[in-house]
Image: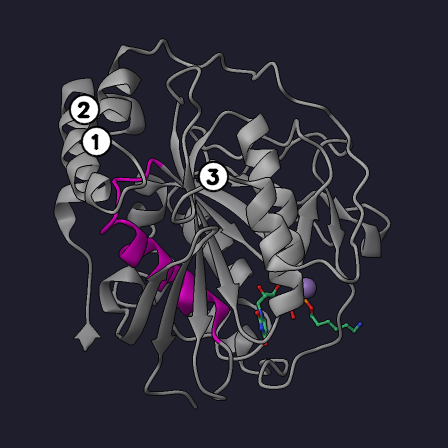
Amino acid sequence: MARRGAASNYFVGAIQEVPKAKDLVASLSKGVVLGKKGTVTDEAFVEKARLDNCPSVSPHLKGQTKLVFKPDLTLEEVQAKNPKVHRGRYRPEECRALQRVAILIPHRHREKHLLYLLEHLHPFLQRQQLDYGIYVIHQAGSKKFNRAKLLNVGYLEALKDEIWDCFIFHDVDLVPENDLNLYRCEDQPRHLVVGRNSTGYRLRYSGYFGGVTALSREQFFKVNGFSNNYWGWGGEDDDLRLRVELHRMKITRPLPEVGKYTMIFHKRDQGNEVNIGRMNLLHQVSRVWRTDGLSSCGYKLLSVNYNPLYVNITVDFWSDP
Ligand code: UDH
Ligand code: MN
């Protein structure tokens, strides 16, 4: 089944302007649907409406954590440690989360990295008291990998489940080290990876906007999402930065001691060779952003599976160079 474009009704107003009543109606109607599957009951949703807002800084944050990657970790172990996560989703029980946040992870042949990321991200997001959902967007087949297009698909498909306020575009191999690196959106797009172990925790270059970024539903919609034309490695993150700058938005970052990540070691993947045409594409951004992006993101949706710890969306792209 081929899909194109995005429904426009999700994009009205800024995050705070979405009326509470509308939220509640949306949650209640979702509750009925989800309740049928025995995951979240109607009462839980009614109860949620009575809760106070969560504080802007959660009392559960631990700061810098020590990450351990156990070689024999299994998905069952991670599931057992996260009994409150259903169909990739979680909401705090004690308060009403300030934002609904979708984590979008582009993926192909990185199962072990995904397992480690899920292991660390679920407790991390729960300590931040977020209402969140994790989506893994899997590119089927062996054509050139297209990270940016997968993330566009993630955005469009995730909005069919929930009117997410905020989107975190997240590499599968980057694990956040510090709980104070808040996975939420602000009034400007945010780049959350200041440094990673492999670069001595320094920014790769001034203007770097890759790895993990946070854009609100409106910010991402305004720039027409990512370009769909970056096949193979590199350039798509710089393209997004240019789109953001063209719209007079200014990228913000956490402090260096907060924006720290461990990148699980890997080599370059087959099917993701360096895109030598990326510089040419970068010269065209101001001319093509309107017509190349969310508005033109065609894909073949092969499946959507609601696993306990994440929603898996599998897609195929019919053209690449
Ligand atoms: N990704 C996959 N599968 C692939 C390719 C990419 O899942 O086959 C996703 C994954 O989420 C990954 C992201 O796309 O984190 C970015 O790709 P990457 O991790 O390969 O990019 P990075 O810049 O590495 O980290 C570049 C190649 C490393 C070469 C090391 C030699 N010095
Ligand atoms: Mn990587």
| Start-end of magenta stretch | 146-165
Which numbered circle lies on residue 24?
2
What's the residue at 19%, 38% (across, down)? Answer: 30
From mark 2 to mark 3, how far is it between C-alphas? 27 Å
Quadrant for the C terminus, please: bottom left
Q: Give the main secondary structure of the magenta stretch.
A: helix
The image position of residue 311, as x and y in percent, is: 39, 56
- Give amino acid for label 1: Ser
The answer to whether the beta carbon of the residue marked 1 is less than 8 Å from any atom of ligand 1 is no
Vertical placement of residue 177 versus 142, above or below: above
Vertical placement of residue 314 versus 50, above or below: below
Q: For mark 1, give the secondary structure.
A: helix
Number of marks in the rendered image: 3
What's the residue at 81%, 45% (across, down)? Answer: 201
In the displayed structure image, the side of residue 175 where residue 134 appears, left or right: left
Q: Earlier in the sequence, mark 2 or mark 3?
A: 2
The image position of residue 273, as x and y in percent, is: 63, 83
| Membership of 154 in magenta stretch | yes
From mark 3 to mark 1, how far is it between C-alphas? 26 Å
Vertical placement of residue 92 versus 210, above or below: above
